[in-house]
Image (cartoon, coloured by chain):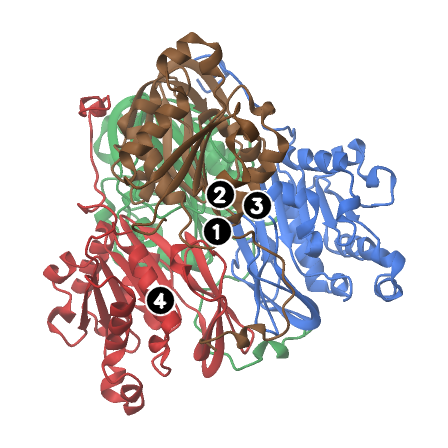
Chain colours: A blue, B red, C green, D brown
């Protein structure tokens, strides 16, 4: 968690393809899915937060070394263009997560390269896009990501995502959803990878105005606060070959 | 897990009150809920298994020191008579679980004394008894308790149990259910307590013939095999005050 | 986690018996173990925090309904007088934890009544009191309880606590210790129980000045911040019997 | 777990380089590290088990589609030649694990490509090769992998592996080791990935005759039994797009 008063720096990444090629989607998200998400974060995060956006079409997909170095938490929305994300950028994002950057993967991002690389599994699931009602139930009511969230959080129309969701056992299951058709899904799950915290949150198909919902926006803002690294210096977990009793030379405690 | 060829000794405990006072229940379960459960275990466990039953009305509720000492796995069904279970028997069962006896707690047994003592929480939940369809989804497809079980396992009519279910974080979540009304429930969860393994499985209200369902019976048989202690001697985890290097005196490895 | 600027109210409970009956202990802890712990919390928690102490000898052990209602986090140190803690007070503390009060159980508190009630197990362990060096290693470097803590945290002289430690699988293992004699111990572990967060931290025998160590004090302050409830109203998880579609009547989201 | 009487098919993979280039290692392991491991498995697994070996120098590293299709559990030892393992073979092994093949990764295999791909992290650790005594403590005494294993299991001389070990939170921690120098290590940990079970066990540097130790051999045999898939047909978790109520057409339960 970010310390009180420290600025929280968030980058919202969106492939931004649906909005370019499908008028129905751009009608729902005139400023892009990333625009709607960023707007929600600006509403619910501290006013001194730095909220940026980046898309696939930007140079280096907008995820340069500089941008990532200045990002505490990255949100990721992708769907039809997973394969167009350059492997070098994927490796860069992966490394930054292991160094400590928080990552929030949204909806169809379950199949994005960096999420699959962090999970090590297929990340497969069941799906059906028939505008079913989704109910998001909180099963860990004291988790900071669930603070202020109704249980159930009701989404009138959403794509169904159903189990079996092929992910590793999560560190924490915060939300479980059900759908009109009866399927269930672990819709809010957390993982630690290296020094970084990862939150996957499944609501958010492009065909529905989910990211304008105030409760959904609160979840994302809670997630960003939760995923932010708490400690100053961040680094990749490293191999070391210390001599016997190396720690006795530490100052103070020994 | 019980070793191949070792006899599995199972005791099915039922308070046995509904069947005595309500003709509708005794019509569904003419041999008692325990009778139906035992019948199912006899069908799906190895033929050399020893399947016994015990009820609240039996002397010491049928759970004497001798019976428990000869029980590898105890199944527990209770509902209206939790308070009538003697505290001394509760303490005895609790101790046997910590020594290594497996325990399978069924449905309304979430509120039985020994389960609450093992969990340390209220074990509260939402409920509604309106014969809703329950869908039991497997979220850990390689767990031995899920072997051979459809996902979803469909129960046409069941009482609804819904989250928030106030239990400790389970060691494993095997099943998650949804109901017609949209609620979800962690319906198959495991816990280790001391040397014993605990499986809670929520389907099974007295008003529906759930324990005659072949898939449900397979779950209970799988659960009994899973919960059985694998090692011979069983004992309560104990305090000890060993001298420095006590383990160097062990034979063989040091 | 307590929100920024909200006052954190901490009560440090100590049985306070060693200090009364053993001059060697009162020489180490002239203001009691509770006094040393409270002093450390005052140093590392925000200045507006309210840090109180209470002991076995106080009326109702100092843990009246009023005190507990005004306590966000309770720290508990006990050893020789576990049996003298009144069952009614144990039940009261247990209920407050399930309602949301944080609980930090220290060292020999592994055998205190309320911890055993929350765990449901024997809480047994190995021990040997020969002033061995304890090394406390961080295995979850991004956990807020580990913020600013050396790995290893070196304690020159401590009682050995060794595995097998008979607790349920923790939600999180933050620290693992080793001792001169070679034993290991899960020395910093967390659990959620009901709406409350529990942190067990094993360093701290009465015969050594552990609670004057700045690193140890940081762990306790981190623990208090972590265990504090994040949300305003707190309540015991309750049973409810909602009608179908009860959530559709909620304002706003449905 | 493999069903009683079903043949268990195990393949022991070893890069086999140390034995070729260093007389001290070939003196310890005249039949290769894989030979010693296979010998131990033959001693402790059922006599009808099929135990094969394969090495880096074999065609396709001995891990053809056919071999993997006939392998229930693969053990993996590698150290100096991780980079020489062909990416196509890594992808093949990774997929077979997700389909259900068990994988046991040994010692310096923490850095092998397939383990890093399954974990998603750096898998970094501390190390020091000074023939320290390793004590392997069981912290989950009822886990089948710990059956019949001393706690501590004493290894007189071993390379030190120490925390922080950069792996995801394991599903289960079975063993924790300490070393003469005071470091600790989660030395026996399990993970589920897709339909496959993974066991990492750290003892086993090439410079010491660890794989001739009967207790170590029992751990590996227990691990092979545990990691074997329990169900017949195995397949990769797959995406599907089912119609509403697809499960109502299932035979039998609905």
Instruction: Please give the name of the residue rendered at 80% of the width and 44% of the height, measured from the top-left corner.
Output: A84
Contact flag, marks 2 and 4 (Cβ < 8 Å): no
| Cα distance between the residues tagged 1 and 2 | 9 Å
Mark closest to the chain's N terminus, 1 or 2? 1
Q: Chain of mark 2?
A: C
Q: Secondary structure at mark 3?
A: strand
| Cα distance between the residues tagged 4 and 3 | 33 Å
Q: Which residue is mark 2?
A: C224
Q: State whether residue B153 is above or below residue B28.
A: above
Residue C47 seen in the current view = no
Q: Secondary structure at mark 2?
A: helix
| Cα distance between the residues tagged 2 and 4 | 46 Å
**Mark nearer the viewer, 3 or 2:** 3
Q: Which residue is mark 1?
A: C72
Contact flag, marks 1 and 2 (Cβ < 8 Å): yes
Can you give x and y, in whole percent of width and height, for residue A158 in the image? 70, 68
Q: Which residue is mark 4?
A: B218
| Cα distance between the residues tagged 1 and 4 | 46 Å
Q: Is residue B203 left or right of residue A184?
A: left
């Amino acid at each position: 968690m970010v310390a009180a008063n420290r600025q929280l720096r968030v980058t919202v990444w969106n492939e931004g393809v649906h909005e370019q090629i499908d008028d129905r989607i751009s009608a729902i998200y005139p400023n892009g899915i990333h625009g709607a998400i960023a707007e929600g974060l600006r509403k619910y995060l501290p006013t001194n937060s730095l909220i940026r956006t980046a898309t696939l079409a930007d140079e280096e997909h907008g995820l340069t070394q500089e941008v990532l170095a200045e990002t505490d938490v990255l949100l990721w929305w992708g769907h039809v263009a997973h394969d167009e994300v350059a492997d070098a950028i994927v490796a860069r994002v992966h490394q930054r997560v292991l160094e400590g950057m928080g990552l929030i993967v949204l909806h169809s991002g379950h199949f994005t390269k960096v999420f699959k690389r962090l999970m090590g599994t297929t990340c497969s699931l069941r799906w059906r896009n028939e505008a079913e009602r989704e109910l998001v139930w909180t099963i860990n009511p004291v988790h900071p990501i669930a603070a202020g969230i109704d249980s159930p959080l009701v989404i009138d129309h959403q794509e169904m995502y159903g189990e079996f969701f092929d992910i590793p056992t999560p560190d924490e299951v915060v939300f479980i959803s059900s759908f009109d058709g009866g399927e269930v899904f672990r819709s809010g799950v957390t993982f630690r990878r290296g020094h970084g915290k990862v939150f996957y949150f499944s609501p958010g198909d492009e065909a529905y105005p989910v990211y304008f919902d105030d409760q959904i926006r609160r979840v994302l803002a809670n997630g960003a606060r939760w995923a932010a690294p708490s400690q100053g210096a961040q680094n990749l977990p490293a191999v070391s070959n210390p001599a016997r009793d190396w720690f006795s030379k530490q100052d103070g405690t020994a």
